[in-house]
Amino acid sequence: MQRKGGRRRESGDHDVEPVDAVLDELYATPPSEFVARREEHAAAARTAGRKEDARRIHAARRPTLAAWAANLLRRSRPEESRRFMELGQALREAHRTLDATGLKELSAQRRHIVSALSRQAAQLSREAGHQLSQAAQREVESTLRAVLADPDAADEWAGGRLEVSLTPPSEFPSDTAPAEPAPRERPRPDTRRRAPAGLARDELAERRHERQEELARAEQAAEDAARQLSGRREEKAGAEASLRRTDEEHERACEEVSAAEQRLRQAHEELDRAERERRDAAERRRTAADALSRAEREAHEAAREVDRLAGRVR
């Protein structure tokens, strides 16, 4: 299926990616490398004759460090991000119906989740080689609060291509209950028929029950998100401990290999020396054998000469 905003690849156009894939890659790229990568992709699209794609790629704006960190969080933690956006939907609904006590409880949970996720974004940034300043981390928190408060902001963040940080709307960023409405003038008595008091109480009780259920759902979503975050931290800690152990084992193995290689070199040197000594000894043996043969011949000839001379004397 053709992606929105992109094109199908032509048969001879294997090195040029669809424009949406290029944009996804760009906004996952650290800001310091963004412009260079953007120009490379734009040039590739122009070379392939895709002028509109090249224009779209070149029009992409480099994200701020905080916006990039928010994009990184969204892409690196898709399941937690999905739960976070679901929590935002529940909180927006609860904010319209809950009383001051319920809102206070939700606000505390919201602060906890936003703070935990912003710390996770900062950690991901550090692991990618980019330290977030306190101001940048506050911008990440602002973006996360906006995602909870505003469905349009949630959609922007879900795309993973933020260029700048998001700001929560004025009606939902605060951690306090909505202000009490201004007092109204006392209505004039009228002759309209009023609902029975018991029915009014039942409706009030039903609305309170609905608000309590919504609060319970929001609390459950917050607990699930916190539990998921804790689980991911434990997994990361376990992975880091395993990595440290394997690093130590690898270092020990390297040391053992180095020592074995040193011993092997020494053994080869000793073998070479023994081979040379063996060749020298064999040469000396041949030389001695030759000398012995000559001596035996000379002795044999000398003995024959003695016998000959002795016969003549007789």
Image (cartoon, rainbow, N blue to C red):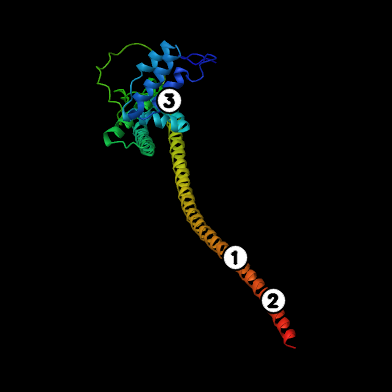
Which amino acid type corresponds to the residue marked 1 in the rendered image?
Answer: Glu
Q: Position of residue 262 (x, y in %)?
A: 49, 58
Quarter the C terminus occupies: bottom right
Q: CA distance from mark 2 to mark 1?
A: 27 Å
Q: Nearer the viewer, mark 2 or mark 3?
A: 2
Q: Position of residue 246 (x, y in %)?
A: 49, 50
Residue 301, disc: 2
**Camera-side residue: 52 or 103?**
52
Quarter the N terminus occupies: top right
**What secondary structure is marked by label 3?**
helix
Q: Which residue is mark 3?
A: 25
Q: CA distance from mark 2 to mark 3?
A: 100 Å
Q: Position of residue 195 (x, y in %)?
A: 41, 17
Residue 125, disc: none
Quarter occupied by residue 117 = top left
Is any part of residue 209 visible from this angle?
no
Q: Which residue is mark 1?
A: 283
Q: Position of residue 211 (x, y in %)?
A: 42, 28
Q: Residues within 10 Å of mark 2 (few under 14, many from 20)?
A: few
**Considering only order in the chain, which callout, 3 or 1, is on the residue closer to the N terminus?**
3
Q: Nearer the viewer, mark 2 or mark 1?
A: 2
